[in-house]
Image (spheres, rainbow, N blue to C red):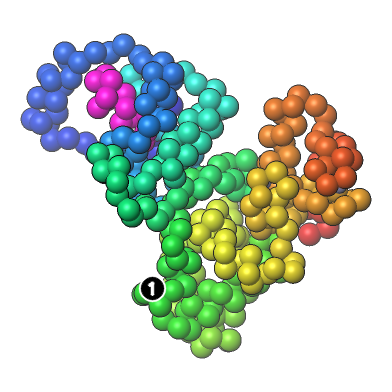
Amino acid sequence: MSDDEAEPVAHDEIKFVFEDVFGAVDKTIPTLAEVRSSATKFNDAHRYILQRMLVDPCVTMKKFNIMYIDYVATRKLKRHPSVVKYIRANGCELRDLAKTISKTINNAKSLNNDDDDAEHELGMRLVILSEESTPKEWVVLISEVQNSEIISEQSDIIKPERDFFLATIDELFENNGKITRKSAIRSGHEKFKLGLVKSEKFLNRMIKEGYFKSSENQKFIELSPRLVAEMDPYLRAKYSTTIHICDLCRRIISRPIYSAECSKCEKYMHLNCFNNATAISDENGVECQGCNTLLKKEDVLREVQNKLNEA
Ligand SMILES: [Zn+2]
Ligand SMILES: [Zn+2]
């Protein structure tokens, strides 16, 4: 495993001393089980993850796991930092690790573990969800006590920007979670009088902060995991009659084009949840929770492909 970010380069002199110190540090590669053993009880490693996520509330599951493994291996198990990348783990084990860490953080009553009587709850929780169009998974820190800050009065965005933001979400929900960047900018300019430059600047800011996602060719913008996680209560209320909820994970389906649909009872599952369920059960499909019809993997994939071709 390797981190996505480059390590800061130390000053030559400091680096020299660093290597000297680390030379004596244990270089035995820890097992994932050793790292995982501390994940179920809230401790300084969880606190470290929370602190990092307050700054960057939406990280890939890979980065999330690396932050934790890195911290535990070097600070708790006192191993040399270079051993982290040699720890062996498969996709299922890593998924389980991220889930375990998140669960421990979500169940913690306060940031201070000596403080069992603390009345205040954290007021935040971690949510794991995938990009619906790809299997890539993200961990998002959201507030439990308030709706997303971006649409609250405390946010630093001005009213026409907020209206533009909400209208763009409308457009995205009406169009399977994907619209052209051009049409979004035009709407900011024409409907909300923001001007083309300001509309584009605001859109880029929302992309940078992870509320929208830019397609690879930059031509489209898409709904992002952060937006879907953070604005869950708003979205359920706003689109209560049209929104589909995944029957397996009970989360919003923001891109129905990437879902398995039961034609008999109109239940929906994220394509990723459906694929995970078939992989776990080792069967060629998943039984619909509503009517017990077997949804066959080949049929589901063919339907998704047809929907993509039509779009
Ligand atoms: Zn799901
Ligand atoms: Zn059904």
Judged by its main secondary structure, the magenta piece is helix
* Residue 117 on image: x %, y %: 29, 46
Q: Disc count in the image?
A: 1
* Residue 284 on image: x %, y %: 83, 29
Whether residue 259 is visible, yes or no, is yes
Q: Is residue 167 above or below residue 253?
A: below
Q: Is residue 15 left or right of residue 80?
A: left
Which quarter of the image is occupied by the N terminus?
Answer: top left
* Residue 230 on image: x %, y %: 50, 59
* Residue 304 on image: x %, y %: 80, 48
Q: Which residue is mark 1?
A: 155
Which quarter of the image is occupied by the C terminus?
Answer: bottom right
Corner quadrant of residue 280: top right
Q: Is residue 30 left or right of residue 305?
A: left
Residue drawn at x 71%, y 63% as measured from the top left: 243
Q: Is residue 251 above or below residue 25?
A: below
Residue drawn at x 40%, y 56% as measured from the top left: 123
Q: Give the magenta-colored segment's residue range.
A: 67-80
Whether residue 210 is visible, yes or no, is no
